[in-house]
Image: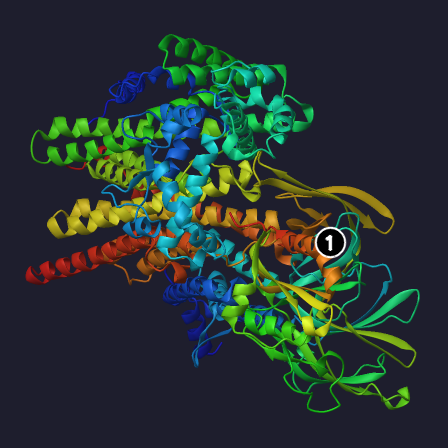
Amino acid sequence: MLPILSFRPARTSSRFYCTLLLISALLSAGPGCKDDRAIHVYRTAKSANLQKESGSAGLGWNMPAGWSVRDGDAMRLASFSAPGPAGEADVSIVRLAGDGGGLAANINRWRGQIQLAPLAENTILNQMQREQGKLGVFKWIQLTNPGLGSNAIYGAVLQSKRGVVFVKMNGSLETLRANQEYFLQLCRSITEKTTSQSSNP
Amino acid sequence: MPPLVWKILKWSSDTRVFFFALIWLSFLVIAGTLAQADLGLYQAQQKYFSAWILWIWYIPLPGGSPVLTIVFVGLLVKLIFFTNWKPRFYGTIVVHFGALLLLFGSFLTAAFSSEGAMVIPEGGRTAFVRDYHAIELAITNRANPEFDETVTFAAGWLKYGEVIHHEQLPFDLEIIQYCANCRLERRSGPPPSSEWKGMARNFNLTEIPLHKDDSNNMAGLVFRIKTKANANNNQLDGIYAIFENMNIPQAFKLAGGDYLLEIRHELRQLPFEIELIDFVKEDHPGTQMARSYSSEVNLIDSDVHQRVLISMNHPLRHKGYTLYQSSFIQAGMGETTVLAVVENVGRLFPYISSLIMCIGLLLHLLIKMPVLFHNRSNAGGEQ
Amino acid sequence: MQTIDYRPTLPVIKGLFWALLVLQSGLYTHCSNSSADIGQKLAKVPVLHEGRIKPLDTFARVHLLAFYGRSTLPGISPMDWLLELLLNPQSAYNRPVFKLRNQDTVAALKLPSKDKMVYSFAELSGGMRESYEDIQRLFRLQQKDLSPVQSEMLRTYQAAMVYYEISRSLSLILPEYEIKTERLARELQLPQNTGLTYMQVFGKERQIQNLAQKLIHKDPNTFSSYDLDLLTIGQHLQFMQSDAQTEILRIVPPLWQDDGDVWYSPWAVVQRGRGSAQSARYLDLWHNLAIAWRSQDQQQLTTSAAALQELAGEITERQVNHSRLLLEYYYSLLDFFTWSLVFYVAAFLLLLASWITQPERLYRASWYTLLIAFILHTIGLLFRVYIMERPPVSTLYESILFVGFIAVAGGLYLEKIKSNATGIMLGSVMGAALQFVGLGYAADGDSMGMLVAVLNTNFWLATHVVTITIGYGTSFVGGFLGHVYLVRRFWQPEKKEELNDLYNTMIGVSLVALFFAMFGTILGGIWADQSWGRFWGWDPKENGALLICLWLLIALHGRLSGYFKAIGYALAMVFTNIIVALAWFGVNLLNIGLHSYGFTDSIALNLLLFCSAELMFMAVLYIMIQYKLERRPG
């Protein structure tokens, strides 16, 4: 048994205050020292690697030969331009969280961009073709509006772990046709970056 | 000493208090472990183990910290006032002392340690560590051709209504919305007023529940810029929105400065630099399963370059920091290593205390052995 | 007074070994396939599979486990099954080998219903062709979103793909072509009317293409037998190209510096130009074996198998550790753990019998039987340590084996000092129970799988993992003693001295358990600190270990503070079993998401059953003891 023993008040009072001091010091130090209102000012060399994550945020791909990277906007993970017989086409990769608002809504938004009327989800699904890529089977669609001249859109919808990835190629139909295989090649090459966390034993 | 205080002291070191504290702690461990399935490790840890108060519905219950504090205080008081220094208790005294040290070390760790990651592509070098969890607002002036000047504000500033004011900045910031995890939504109509600028004109930030895996959370901030009177340019005044890892970051030129506004995971500068020479992943033959991975790095401190191999179970320790091989990224052409960087003052305590506890328990066992495992046949007991 | 004589121990071990060998090899002799000894000859041929070199015999068993759910088929040895699949796929395709577990899956795969739900590849592929679209769709779902039937469908599909890949592994050296017309034979300079292999034909590919070009403009109705012959061989050649990707049967050792330790499959050797004189000879011998197998010529079979065995032996000696391969072969053959289970059960039965009749003799017999079981158990563990070159515990399966080992060792030790049958009881029950659980885990696949990078450290496996597993084992010993105490307290409350002795033992065991659990937990923390920089991260596995320590501390301090008297302490010990089981198995359920799996998963169900049984036991015994106390006050 570990009994509670030795009642010796005469010698304990100094020990008592030491203990009290120690405990209170610890308690005040504990939660108080991580300052969540800190302000830091520092200088860094222009070349410093500031640990920015690349905009691709967990996705990787291979850019088809002949294409070039170009500046996009805040929403895009990447933008490319694809040269072709009838001017350059604009290619973009965008990822939206969850289901991205639904397949039909997004395809219909593209349809709207070349002035096509929205369609029901089933009809759209029937128009889509299937391909096998690194993210599994994905669907893609060719949107053309004969009434509008040559402007057309090729769009692909891929399912990734952190949301839906939309790849869109927009330009004149002739250029798109010339780049169709490259476009699919890009879609097929999109992968989740293989990061491997060390797991616990 | 007043009798009441004495009573409290005696009570706090009572075995029964310890008994119930342990039962509650066990409950917390079970609940916190189960909660990890839904909340993820980090959030569950915050809610159950690090917290002082655990809220279940609207009922406040003691979290992990108060329980460990009670145990610590009890052990301390017991050791100082109520120890029975007889040989047969030596074992338990040593064990209790070891436990005290262990708890003390965990206080230090909880209070003073920090951890983050370094992501370095092959051939790249960096001195910065990105914190796993803490978010900061960073405003960088890029006008000087030699260097960038950065002002950072920790997460405590990012609250609705907070006004950020700093002498190095020619503008004030008023926080309108902060969300630890947000989703971008395209506005259905035009923006409410012409005050909304940049990305905020076309997009809304909507707060969504935190993801289990903290690295999947995307922090976002909506704020109002108000240029200071001496800047002589109020065209920039308006409401802006930024989120983590924007492709085209929010920036503007004002009063001779070129400012970049970012919301990001906290960056800390180390007193040395690391350059990745080569990352090697070795697989079990004929499979895709990693047998080992390692990073060959240059440790650059002042002007001294030193080659070091960091691999699984073989970290690099330097100036109080420890760098571990944590993971890697393989995409496209090159390989990128991810090193975990930890700074922990209390790092040695577990080693010392566990040694003491084990010695104590062994001592206790040896003392008790003859009583507990006596040989009945030798003792002549009946069959 | 009982005394235990150790003298016969050594001869017993030797005798056991031979007895097992005779018993096991006897199992296959009744199914006298013409090629029975061919399989045995080639059992030790080395193959690189799942990251390590293993005997072909293990390769066969692991795949049978995946297809059939057990490592042997009735009526045919694993090696003979594999050889048939490799050398004569067409006949193997009709052998039922895929076992489904669920009638709904049978229906979903559009298969005819059968009592035993064992299907041949021919049947399965017929059904799969029809449900192909569904299966492709399943591949896109996350593991956790799959219903049990769906995941079974996927599993079966994947198993069938692996099966097919194995069956095509040697297709390049199988006689699959035949030229029927003399003209074509002459033009291609190949023999007429004999089996030709891809290896012989593919050099003529260009020539065949050129000849076939001429047929393009010809009306198919006017094709001569020569034309048809040409077309058939051309199509077949193209069909064979799809086999070129088969990589599973890596039997050709690396001969080139830059290959490192990667072995190649026969197809890869040809495709990637990794061939050498030696690999050509090796493949030639396999070809001869295939010819002999198909003709069922016994003498030719024996000679070609012997030649192959000899060359494989040479390869083994040069490339890999020969004794490890040999030991692994015997490890699979002798099946130590199943036999130790048999002996544990026998020891338990003998002990029960000793309470009815012949106490002295049967008690001693039971002791020796337990000892034999323990020795088999130990030999099995030692085999594994030697074959894997790593400490005894690194996977869940191994932890089960090792906890059993510790519990039985504890039982034997207690029996040695107390000689009151409690130890034998403990050892036989725990040994049997854990070996039985282990059998289920052994059925998951190769029990000697490779480890992920972070676990690839013998030092920490040997210290932390072994220590914490000893902690589990000793905790179970304590838990078992708790049961014994409660039962005896109810049946024999008058034996105060013995009960008190048991109580003290229980405390002692829980102190030992606490020591190992705590030491193991702390070592785990130190490993974590060494490996990724934090001593404690509230990770489920760490929490599980912590929980055991906390519970043992609660039990010990509950006793000190007077909350637990003897009965309470015994109840707390029984509860330790629940805590250990949760920390050990429950934690593994968390990782895959308890909420989505529900309790359909068998581990979860068994765990639930175990915990409720223990709780029931505690409640019933407590009530019974209290009731008896009330009826007989004092």
| Of residues B282 and C212, the one drawn nearer to the viewer in this rendering | C212
Residue A22 in the image, given as x and y percentages of width and height:
58, 68
* Residue type at tag 1: Met
Give the vertical position of B185 relative to C556 (above or below). Answer: below
Few, some or many C-alpha atoms within 10 Å of disc 1 (few <14, some 14-19, many ≥20)?
A: some
Position of residue C501 relative to residue C421, above or below, is below
Element at badge 1? loop
> Can you say which quadrant of the picture contains the N terminus of chain C?
top left
Using residue A70 as the reference point, say whether residue B263 is left or right of it: left
Query: Which residue does the numbered mark 1 point to in the structure image?
Result: A63
Picture residue at 38% right of the left edge, 19% below the top: C39
- Judge left or right: residue B15 versus residue C417: right
Image position of A150 with respect to C213: above or below = below
Is residue C382 visible from the viewing direction of this image?
no
Number of marks drawn? 1
Residue at horizontal 40 percent and vertical 54 percent from the top: C589
Residue B287's spot in the image, x, y percent?
56, 37
- Chain letter of disc 1 in the image: A
Q: Where's residue B211, x and y in %?
A: 55, 68
Q: Position of residue B88 (x, y in %)?
A: 39, 49
The residue depicted at 35 percent of the width and 49 percent of the height is C109
Query: Observer-nearest residue: C98 or A139?
Result: A139
- The one nearer the camera, C563 or B220, is B220
Quadrant for the C terminus of chain C in the image: bottom left
